[in-house]
Amino acid sequence: MRRTVDWVDGAVVIIDQVALPGEYRVLELRTVDELVAAIQRLAVRGAPALGAAGALGVALAAFAGGSADAVRAQAERLAAARPTAVNLRWGVTRALGRLDEGAEAVLAEALVMLDEDEQLNRTASAHAAEVVLAETTRRPLRLLSHCNAGHLATVAWGTALGVVWHLQARGLVESVLVDETRPLLQGSRLTAWELAQAGVPYRVQPDSAAATAMARGLVDCVLVGADRIAANGDVANKIGTYPLAIAAAHHGVPFVVVAPESTVDTSIASGAAIEIEERRPEELTELGGVRLAPAGAAVFNPAFDVTPAALITAVVTENGVRAPQPTS
Ligand SMILES: CSC[C@H]1O[C@H](OP(=O)(O)O)[C@H](O)[C@@H]1O
């Protein structure tokens, strides 16, 4: 499968994740405006993929010319396009750090990030696979995923789903229960698509069925990605992750978070400081243009929630299991 986000002939090229699973479409984005719009409508999404897209977006701005201040202003637009995943601002900042050397240097830095991402994800998910095996006894494993933390959420390979690829290669996966992940359905649309492509048995379930699946003993381990990890180990991830962790703790099911170190934000002590993106009401009140709620219905639509470190079995990065820094 091609990279989720890449640089081809002066354009940022992405797999259009809004079109999946019905259509596999590739988009060429040649301006910062086009890239910001693609980020905000989740055509490109997932923390590591956003970091790479942000860095390549700075290259678009640098090659477009204009003053350094103009490029920095465009970079800020990219970094602010979605507030919760720390990787976006991190990727923009890293690429912008080469601006004084010129546009080619900015692009070179961004391309290094893309090359690094797949390897970091393969390493982090390999570590996490060993954690899953150590925390479980039943073989083969029945796993549960939320949202999409696979190839499509990264430049390549994936984080939480990367664990599935490693375990599947060793014949250790029986099946995956895939939370559909309302309201944008990253699970039923994207994770199910990736698992089908890989030949991994799976079933899609309502997010609200996850606790029942655990109560019935159908889940050996929960695997999720992350968008921002605080110094104390609190994790911001797709809305619905927190109740999943509560259910897992109640039923004694291991709950493992997989992410690159670039998702860790040591500048914040705990999850209380993580900005949670609020998204448009229409994501809840409509589906495919069909109205699901009365006109004018008020909506609460946070795109992420925060899972306290106490509910997490392990946060695993390319460096292994992270030891949380307890808040003073
Ligand atoms: C490997 S990061 C994936 C992470 O990002 C998703 O959010 P979104 O689809 O809104 O970009 C979700 O929180 C995933 O766990």
Image (tube, helix red, strand yellow):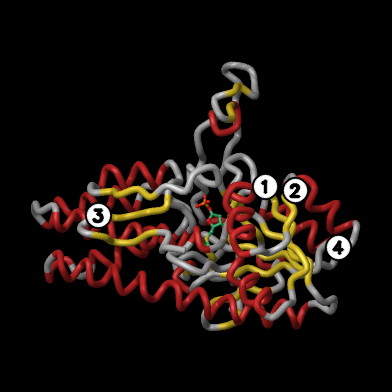
Mark 4 to mark 1 CA distance (whole Å) = 21 Å
Kind of residue indicated by mark 4: His
Q: Which residue is mark 1?
A: 180
Nearer the observer, 311 or 127 = 127
Q: Label 4, on which residue?
A: 251
Asked if the residues shown at circle 4 and circle 1 are in contact, with their CB atoms under 8 angstroms apart, the answer is: no
Q: Tell me how far mark 3 sits from mark 4, CA to CA.
A: 48 Å
Res 11 label = 3
261 vs 270, nearest the viewer: 261
Q: Indicate yes or no: mark 2 CB to ligand 1 under 8 Å.
A: no
Question: Three-letter amino acid code at disc 2?
Answer: Gln
Query: Label 1 to label 2, Cα distance in Å?
Result: 6 Å
Please report the residue visible at 31 percent of the width from the left and 51 percent of the height from the top.
78
Q: Earlier in the sequence, mark 2 or mark 4?
A: 2
Task: Kindly check if marks 2 and 4 are in contact, taking CB atoms under 8 A apart as contact.
Answer: no
For mark 2, what is the residue? 205
Vertical position of residue 172 compared to residue 196: above or below: below
* Mark sitting earlier along the chain (3/4): 3
Q: Nearer the viewer, mark 2 or mark 4?
A: 2
- Disc 3, ligand 1: is the CB inside 8 Å? no
Q: CA distance from mark 3 to mark 2?
A: 37 Å
Q: Are marks 1 and 2 in contact (CB under 8 Å)?
A: yes
Q: Earlier in the sequence, mark 1 or mark 3?
A: 3
Amino acid type, residue under disc 1 in the picture:
Glu
